[in-house]
Structures are given as C-alpha cells and as structure tokens.
Image (spheres, grey):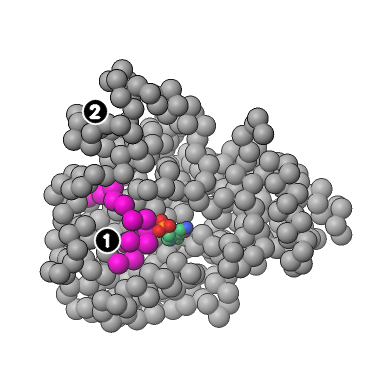
Amino acid sequence: MNQRAYNFSAGPSMLPVEVLEEAAKQMLNYRGCGESVMEMSHRSKAFKEILQGARENLKQLLNIPSNYQVLFLQGGATLQFSMIPLNLMGKNGKADYVVTGSWAKKAAKEAEKYGDINIVASSEEDNFTYIPRLKAEDFRKDADYVHITYNNTIYGTHYAQPPETGDIPLVADMSSCLLSEEIDVSRFGLIYAGAQKNIGPAGMTIVIIREDLIGKAKKDSPVYLDYQVHADNDSSYNTPPCYSIYMAGEVFKHLLDRGGVSAMAQRNRQKADLLYDFIDQSGLFNCPVDRESRSQMNVVFVTGDEDLDKKFVEKAKEQAMHNLNGHRSIGGMRASIYNAMPLEGVKKLIEMMKEFEGENQ
Ligand code: PMP
C-alpha cells in the first residue's frame, strides 16, 4: 500500500498527517539540538520546554481555569480507575458511579476495592444504547464523588450534557472525546483521558484535576498513584512518557493553528451528521443508539446479519478503509471518526455503504 488508509480504529487511531510529517522531520535532530526527542533526558531544558508548552497549549485549548492542575501520567485510563478512588474517597469512603458501558463498569468494579460504591443508574439492560437522565437528587449526598464515562467508545453513546451533581465533585472519563468538543471544565472535579484517540500516541494519560482534590490520597497508596506527587514534580517524578508528551504537544499546536476546539467541534458535528443521516435513511444499515445519546466520535451500526457485517468490514478494508469492525464484545460495525479523520474519509465510507447496500438488498 503506497497510500495512507482511512483508519476508523477506536484507538490508537489516526493522527493529523501534518503532525506526523513534522515529527518525521525532527526525528533525528530535534530543532538542531543534536538529539531525537526519544533520546533526550527528561531533565533537559529542551524537554522541560516541550512539557510546559504542551501543558500551556492544552490549558488554552480547553480554557482550563487557574485552580486546576494538568498532569501527564502513565498507566492509561485504566490506572485512573484505581487512582481516582485512592485519592478522592478519603472523606466518607463512598462514591456513586453511572454505568453506561464496559469501561464504566470496569471503573466501578475497581473502585469497589476501596470503598462503598453505589451504581446510581445503568443502561445495561438495553445493551448500553442510551445515557440515563439523572438529577442531583439521584446521587448520595455524602458521596465523595460521582463518576461518569462521558463518551462510551464501544457503544457509541455520549452525554448530551454533564449531570448536575451539586457540591459533589464530578469525575469524567473523557478518553474518547477530549478535545473533540467544547466543555466547561469548571463543571468537573477531575477529567481524565488516555491519549490514543484525539490526543497522540498511546502511553500518556491526561488528568485535569481541581486543586482542592489534590493531596488527599490514602496514606498507604503507592507513590505513583498519589496526584500530589505528580503535581509537586511537574509530571516528572519519574521518567515521564517523553515522546508521547511531545507528540501530544504537537497535536495541541496543530489544533490551535486550526481554530481550536470550537473549530474541531464544528467539523466533527458535520462528519457525524453526514454519517448518521445516511444510516437513518438506509434500508440496510441501522444505528441501534438512542438519538439523544449518540456519540460524534464513535458511530455504531449493523446490518442485522453477522455474515453481511463481516463482508462489509472486509470490503471496506480492500478499499483502504481500515478497522470498521465493532468492538470484539459486541460485533457489528463502528466508525471512529476522531478529530484527525478527514471529512473525505467519512464521504468515502458513505459512498461505499451506498454501493454495498445496492449489491446486498
Ligand atoms: N475508558 C474509555 C472510554 C476507553 O475508550 C478506553 C480504551 N479504549 C479506556 C477507558 C481504557 O483505556 P486505556 O487502554 O488507556 O487504559
């Protein structure tokens, strides 16, 4: 294959081609310093500037208020499933979780090791095809935090807006939607996201945490799992994921140059609307997700016939449209159309769907 494919993978996923080209240019000798970023000491001036630049640009992109810290950590979103209860459940030992998919379920299960976890609502009985609507009264008044998965990568659902939780800090897993839309960070106590979707290569996890929630880790927590340790050490208590931080920083610059998150949100809406509109009028393809709960990042669809679904995924691959299979736990199809997926990729997919429909009805 001598052309780049349209990669619809849920993550790791496409990165902006301009960012990859710039990284390739800088690969052997970063800005004339004689070293690759991969070879650079994490204590060097050059790397410190990369890290600080990435953090400042992220703050600008998301309008992060000054009473929040941005941390660049390792361990993926999965390690946050443990770090969050270890750090935030110190007061009453209680937390409320909303279960809207497998990742939310895994987060709740992990938290159960550390305290009293209440599942406030779950959409599992309907195969996670919708986001439950919740009011502030639905949460326990003495919960230390409420945890939600803002975008459910596997099921293609997304909160239309964050639930009202009153004074209880709201914690959100935004792994598959951070930087795809405008958010009001002040509505959240903590936001976290693995990098490998809208941000950069895998290996780095972003945590945006309100300062009053730092410094409360359980006394016997492993040192790496204490947010205070990372906040006090500029995300460099130990060797940070240097290259992933560098690449994320390049993506942040790229987004700022192209109008920031609001411009991305507009493009993402356009891409998702095109695809959902096509599916909704199709006689072959169907999207099982409740309209109000649909994700603009992960578009899930089926034909209703497993063999036909497989044939579709194979045919798409032959036409350089990769990874359109649904998650291995649910099958069907899923088109992940993160920031870096061009509009042309979505148009090409729709053309192929039309053709496939004509051949298979
Ligand atoms: N949460 C969500 C919403 C995800 O999509 C994923 C991974 N796809 C995870 C958590 C787990 O992330 P990681 O692999 O970075 O641990």
Q: Which mark is residue 135?
A: none
Q: Taking 156 as reference, is 38 above or below it?
A: above
Q: Tag count in the figure?
A: 2
Vertical side of 297 occupied by 145: above or below: below
Which numbered disc, 2 or 1, marks the residue that appears first in the sequence?
A: 2
Q: Please state, as top left, top right, bottom left or bottom right, where the N terminus lies in the image.
A: top right
Q: Is residue 83 magenta?
A: no
Q: In the image, what residue type sits under mark 2?
A: Ala
SS assignment at label 1? loop
The structure residue drawn at horizontal position 60% and vertical position 48%, both measured from the top left corner, is 8
Residue labelled with disc 1: 189
Q: Residue furthest front?
A: 39
What x and y, as percent, mark residue 198?
Answer: 46, 46
Q: Residue at x 18, y 72 (%)?
A: 90
Tell me the magenta residue range. 69-82
Q: Is label 2 in a helix, a strand or a loop?
A: helix
Quadrant where the C terminus sits is bottom right
Badge 1 crowding class, 10 Å Cα cut-off, few under 14, some 14 to 19, many 20 or more, is many
- Residue closest to the far top: 32
* Quadrant of res 106: bottom left
Q: From the viewer's perspective, is 310 left or right of 50?
A: right
- Mark yes or no: residue 158 visible: no
Q: Label 2 belongs to which residue?
A: 46
Q: Does 74 lie within the magenta span?
A: yes
